[in-house]
Every structure is written in structure tokens, then in C-alpha cells.
Amino acid sequence: MSVRNLARSYRVGIVCGVLAVLALLAVTTAFGQGTGTVGVLVEFPGGDMRAFCVDVETPSDRVTTLLATGLDVVTKDWGWGITVCAIEDVGCFPPDECFCDVHSWTFFRWNRAEHAWEFPMDLTVADGDVVAWVWTDFDPETWMPNNWPSLDDVSLDQVCAMQFEQEFVPEPATVLLLGSGLAGLAGYAGLRIRASKSKPD
């Protein structure tokens, strides 16, 4: 084999190798991403909890998943990462002061294998995950959160059911309006019945 043919064979081999790697990356990306469902719990001070079942491109990140809930979220991009400063007006203001008195919104993920909440360093979110945001302070010695999510055992189905319940529980004003409307109809029906009985034949 001549030197020219040998050089051509190497070039063809390199081009084929590069094309194979690009094809493998395209297939891996196509099958590795897609729309997934994630359960999101947000625990406000005082024990108020909101539950959301959101569809996001997975794998996703914690902030994108939180924003998918539709809550009013204030964030700060520090260049090394994004911090959640406030959710629904609970948090630190202005956003430049994203940590106030060692309090912050803290991200947790439910570990399905160990049936326990974790305070992860890996901030990605996958299809079927349940994550939580809790307003908490930190232990000054260990820098671990003092408040963890209050649910001891949780699943995606449970979070989706919680969202359904909170969306369809009528507010007190709605119940009052419905009740007064029904009372009015009952009163009107009673007047009609009395009027028909008092008419002479």
C-alpha cells in the first residue's frame, strides 16, 4: 500500500469515526430528553403548602421546574448559579440580598430508592421526581437546613392528587355566594307555594 493510499485511508477512518460519534450523540440526546412530569411542593412559613404537577423538558433544573408552577418567583443569577430569592412575596428583598438572616428558599428532592428527602448537590430534576422548596434557616455549624419538607412519604401521584384537591376546594366567598343564592331560590319557591294556596278557586 502506497503512502498516498495509507493517508487517504486514515482520513476516511477519521471522518467515519467523527460521523459515528456525532450520530451517537444525536441519538443519545434524542432519547435522553423529553417531556416529563414532576411533582413540586412549596412550603411557606406557617405550614402553608402548595402542590403542583408540572410537565417540563427532562432532565431539567430546579429553577425551571419551579417556574413551571406559575408561581411568582424572584431569582438572582450570580454567574455561578441561580438563587431563588422569593416565592409569592415570601423571601428576601431586594434580589441583591438573596439571603436574609441566614434564611433562604432551599431545594430538596425525594429519594425514591431510600424513601427519604435529600438536600442534593446535584440540582437536576428527572421525570417522575418529587421536589420541594422550603423557606428555612441553616445550622451555623453544619450549614444544613433546619427545616425539611413536612411530608414523610410522598409520591408523584400523591402530589398530583394534592394539586387537584387545592384547585377544586371552593373559597369561603364562593360558598357564601352559592349558599345565599340557594336560600334566595328556596325563599322564592316558598312565596310561590303560599301564593298558590291562598288563591280562591
Image (cartoon, rainbow, N blue to C red):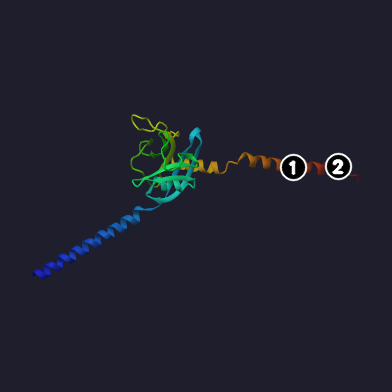
Residue occupying image coordinates x 11% and y 70% = 4
- CA distance for labels 2 and 1: 20 Å
Q: Residue furthest right?
A: 200
- For label 2, count other residues whose C-alpha is less than 10 Å away and answer few (under 14), some (14-19) or many (20+): few
For marks 2 and 1 on the same chain, the one whose residue lies earlier in the sequence: 1
Q: Closer to the camera, 43 or 186?
A: 43
**Disc number at residue 197?**
2
Can residue 162 be seen in the rendering of this structure? Answer: yes
Residue occupying image coordinates x 62% and y 39% = 172
Look at the numbered disc 1 and give the secondary structure of its residue: helix
Can you give x and y, in whole percent of width and height, for residue 30 in the image? 34, 57
Look at the numbered disc 2 and give the secondary structure of its residue: helix
Can you give x and y, in whole percent of width and height, for residue 56 in the image? 43, 50
In the rendered structure, which amino acid carries the disc numbered 1? Gly
- For label 1, count other residues whose C-alpha is less than 10 Å away and answer few (under 14), some (14-19) or many (20+): few
In the rendered structure, which amino acid carries the disc numbered 2? Lys
Q: Closer to the camera, 65 or 158?
A: 65
Residue under pointer 1: 184
Q: Is residue 131 left or right of residue 6?
A: right
Q: Quadrant of residue 113?
A: top left
Can residue 154 be seen in the rendering of this structure? Answer: no
**Disc number at residue 199?**
none
Can you give x and y, in whole percent of width and height, for residue 179 in the image? 69, 40
Q: Which of the two discs, 2 and 1, sits closer to the camera?
A: 1
